[in-house]
Image (cartoon, rainbow, N blue to C red):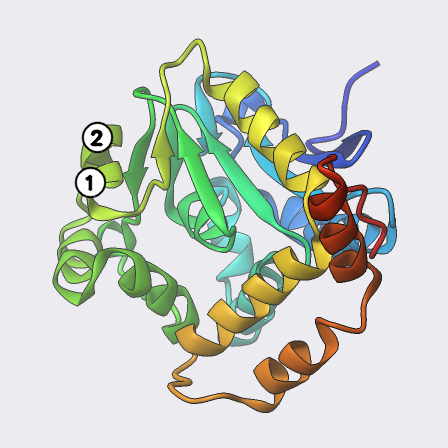
Amino acid sequence: MTSPPIHLDTDGPVARLILDRPAKRNALSRAMWQAIPDLVAAAAADPEIKVLIVRGASAEAFSAGADIAEFEQVHGSAVAARRYHDVIAAAYDALGQLEKPTIAMIRGVCFGGGCALALCCDLRYADPSARFCIPPARLGLTYSLGETKRLVDLVGPSKAKEMLMGATVLDAEEAHRLGLVTRLFPAADLEADTLAFARHLSSLSQFTIRAVKQIVGEITHGAVTETEISKRLLERQFEGPDYLEGRRAFLEKRPPVFTWR
């Protein structure tokens, strides 16, 4: 039985959003973009899922980007182009706004919309085969402010301009050095080590992990003093079950068993 081109697989507390069009190097069709919000929503709604890994199904590619074979149709008119952009933006927003931690596991090409999708994740783990490129200048296109900001936040304005203006390809080592890649693993270790860290996250306080994600998000969006969200999280921390369990476990010299979802 053939797998759908994008699907959600679950293994205990870790789910995988798998891009599965190997013949097209996991190029994202309109249907795949449209499927992402519902798949992410399914991961959000399942209380047993604590971490989402986004990955390609094969070692050759994370994703080659949006499926250019569809461009004549999806960009056939200004109205069609706006609708297509809205579909893609909804996919980015769904992944970027997921409260649970997300990890992009990257092997091979990670280009265009595929790279932009990886930028929506909290972490990007890669092996030496990974290659990164956002090539709008090869197509006469431009990326939205939101998409561009995610890149600028990671690599800085000058390198972002070079990548976008010059359609520059970064190898894995340079991407790691610039901060686009969070961690670089040997090819043989990438999958196991990514899963190991996802499981490690699953064993820790989900209240803390999601609070970190929210507060960093506030900072990324310009906050320099406490916000309503950060104040609320600071007030709630001592009332929740995770703090009580963490304190007891520390005093009893045992691993904590956190229950907050």
**Crowding at mark 2 (Cα within 10 Å: few <14, some 14-19, many 20+):** some
Instruction: Tell me the kind of residue under disc 1.
Output: Arg
Q: x and y percent of residue 26 in the render?
A: 53, 31
Q: Quadrant of residue 15?
A: top right
Lateral position of residue 99 relative to residue 12, left or right: left
Q: Tell me what residue is drawn at x 83 percent, y 56 percent.
A: 260
Q: Say which of 22 and 38 sits in front.
A: 38
CA–CA distance in space, label 2 to label 1: 6 Å
Lateral position of residue 57 relative to residue 156, left or right: right
**Quarter occupied by the C terminus:** bottom right
**Crowding at mark 1 (Cα within 10 Å: few <14, some 14-19, many 20+):** few
Q: Tell me what residue is drawn at x 25 percent, y 39 percent.
A: 175
Instruction: Tell me the kind of residue under disc 2.
Output: Glu
Q: Say which of 8 and 6 sits in front.
A: 8
Q: x and y percent of residue 147 in the render?
A: 41, 65
Q: Which residue is mark 1?
A: 177
Can residue 225 be seen? yes
Q: x and y percent of residue 89 in the render?
A: 56, 66
Q: Is residue 61 above or below residue 192?
A: below
Q: Tell me what residue is drawn at x 55 percent, y 58 percent.
A: 74
Q: Is residue 206 above or below residue 257?
A: below
**Quarter occupied by the N terminus:** top right
Residue 148 is marked as none
For the residues bearing labels 2 and 1, Cβ distance under 8 angstroms: yes
Q: Tell me what residue is drawn at x 81 percent, y 42 percent.
A: 257
Q: Quadrant of residue 212?
A: bottom right
Lateral position of residue 141 relative to residue 62, left or right: left
Q: Say which of 71 and 242 sits in front.
A: 242
Q: x and y percent of residue 173 in the render?
A: 21, 30
Label 1, secondary structure: give it.
helix
Q: Which residue is mark 2?
A: 173
Check the image and name the residue furthest to the top.
188
